Amino acid sequence: KLSERLQTVASFVKLNARIADIGSDHAYLPVSLAKNNQISFAIAGEVAKGPHQNATHEIIAEGVQKIVSSRLGDGLDVISPEDQIDTVVIAGMGGTLITQILERQKNKLKGVTDLILQPNVGEQSVRNWLMHHDYQIKAERILKEDHHIYEIIVAEQGKTPTYSEKELLFGPQILQTLPNNIFEEKWQAELQRVKNAMSQMQRSQVVPEERIIKLNHKATLIKEVLTLED
Ligand code: SAM
């Protein structure tokens, strides 16, 4: 059974999709989708040997090797044109790593209409990448599981709107769900982190002014969105 986080990711995969799950680890996501007859084909991509072996074992143990292919390789390298992949899933990594993976082999994304991304941190850089590469954010989720707050960003190829600074930081679709307890918890904690960082800097001898200005600005954005909420 999938975690709530992966279950939510899975809920955005379209029926009969051909997916590449990059950084699949145990391949739980594609195996579950295959067992439920939700997908036509999947690649479970892994850059590390151990997780790649875990994926291979899981696929065989669950008897879905006709549908799910376990491949060792860096990022989108594991995708070939013959695979006709239409959906790329990247979950459980930092946002910067996710954008690096997408950016490094952009040519592999030509036929990819759907991206389902679950950054653990750095959601802003993921949204910024999407905006600059003609992917429109169609849906977002924020959820809490095992004391962690996760965001899921679902995008489709097409004309890109320009997102405001606030939308990039908080999520254009998540902003539509306010007031939202989990959102509030996440950004209250982030505001506290920003405040701590600022007071630490003010105590230090050399004050990097640019950094302070940036943090101050972020604190202002967070305060604005949190007051809008109540
Ligand atoms: N996607 C699963 C999930 O969300 O539960 C597993 C997430 S796991 C924390 C991250 C996985 O990404 C690791 O198994 C790691 O080896 C893999 N990974 C990291 N960088 C990668 C890359 N450039 N290409 C493919 N896999 C990568």
Image (cartoon, rainbow, N blue to C red):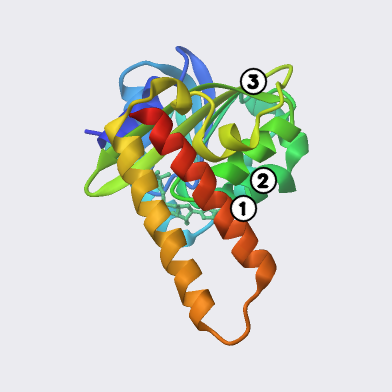
- Residue at image position (74%, 17%) is 159
Query: x%, y% of residue 113?
Result: 64, 20
Figure quadrant of the C terminus:
top left
Which image quarter is the N terminus in?
top left
Considering every residue shown, the one lying at the far right of the view is: 107
Q: Amino acid at mark 1?
A: Asp
Mark drawn on residue 113: 3
Total numbered badges shown on the rendered structure = 3
Find numbered disc 1 in the image and state the secondary structure of the residue it sits on.
loop
Which one is in front in this view, the residue at disc 3 or the one at disc 2? Answer: 3
Residue shown at the point (38%, 25%) measured from the top left: 178
| Earlier residue among tags 3 and 2 | 2
The residue that mark 2 highlights is 77
- Height in image: 114 above or below 123? above
Relative to 226, 42 lies left or right: right
- Disc 1 target residue: 74
Asked whether the residues under the numbered discs 1 and 3 touch, taking CB atoms below 8 Å apart as contact, a structural biologist would say no
Which residue lies at the image location 53% right of the left edge and 84% below the top edge?
Answer: 204
Q: Nearer the viewer, residue 54 or 168?
A: 168
Task: Using the rendered image of the protein, determine whether residue 117 is visible from the camera's viewpoint.
Answer: no
